[in-house]
Amino acid sequence: MSKENMKLYWKRNVRILFILLAIWFLVSFGFGIFFREALDAFQLGGFPLGFWFAQQGSIYAFIILIFVYVRLMNKLDKGFGVDE
């Protein structure tokens, strides 16, 4: 792989990481802590939505983010010809 392709590959890789980390931050800190009071106006399974995000929703979001990361990286690797 040429140096230009390596730089482009890592640039896209870092962009994917920052986007997923921003989503992680929004779900864990935003929904679970900062916006908890506003979300508590809604109920999910008999529990306030802010509480649910702090206890369960963030875990589900993290698992989904792992699968999204794997899929995006596999696509990126295939696009640059570095897949296994």
Image (spheres, helix red, strand yellow):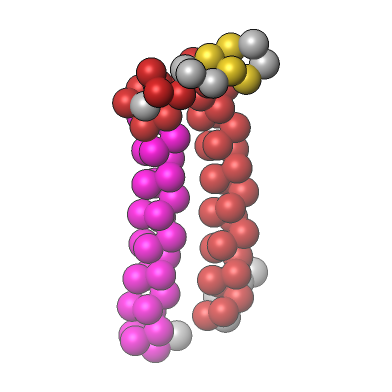
Q: Is residue 55 above or below residue 7?
A: above
Left or right: where 58 falls relative to 74: left
Residue 33: tell me if it is visible: yes
Residue 20 magenta-drawn? yes
Number of marks drawn = 0
8 left or right, relative to 51: left
Give the x, y percent position of residue 29.
Answer: 36, 29
Which segment did they paint magenta?
A: 2-29
- Residue ranking furthest to the top: 46
Judge whether residue 54 can be spotted in this image: no
Identify the image quadrant of residue 38. top left
Residue positioned 34% across, 86% down in the render: 4
From this viewpoint, which residue is outermost toward the front? 41
Q: From the top left corner, tell me how far across and down residue 48 is, in percent.
A: 53, 14
Displayed quadrant of residue 43: top right
Name which quarter of the figure residue 32 lies in. top left
* Quadrant holding the N terminus: bottom left
Q: Is residue 12 above or below residue 4?
A: above
* Residue at the image point whose x is 54% and y is 45% from the top: 65
Left or right placement of residue 38 versus residue 51 in this view: left
**Residue sitting at x 54%, y 63%:** 73
The stretch drawn in magenta includes residue 48:
no
Overall secondary structure of the magenta stretch? Answer: helix
Looking at the rendered image, the quarter that the C terminus falls into is bottom right
58 w.r.t. 4: above or below: above
- Up the image or down, 76 lies above or below 27; here it is below
Query: In terms of depth relative to the viewer, which is nearer, 23 or 45?
Result: 45
**Which of these two is toward me, 38 or 82?**
38
Residue depicted at x 46% and y 24%: 39
In depth, the one of 68 and 3 nearer the eye is 68
Q: Where is residue 34 in the image (x, y as percent from the top left)?
A: 32, 26
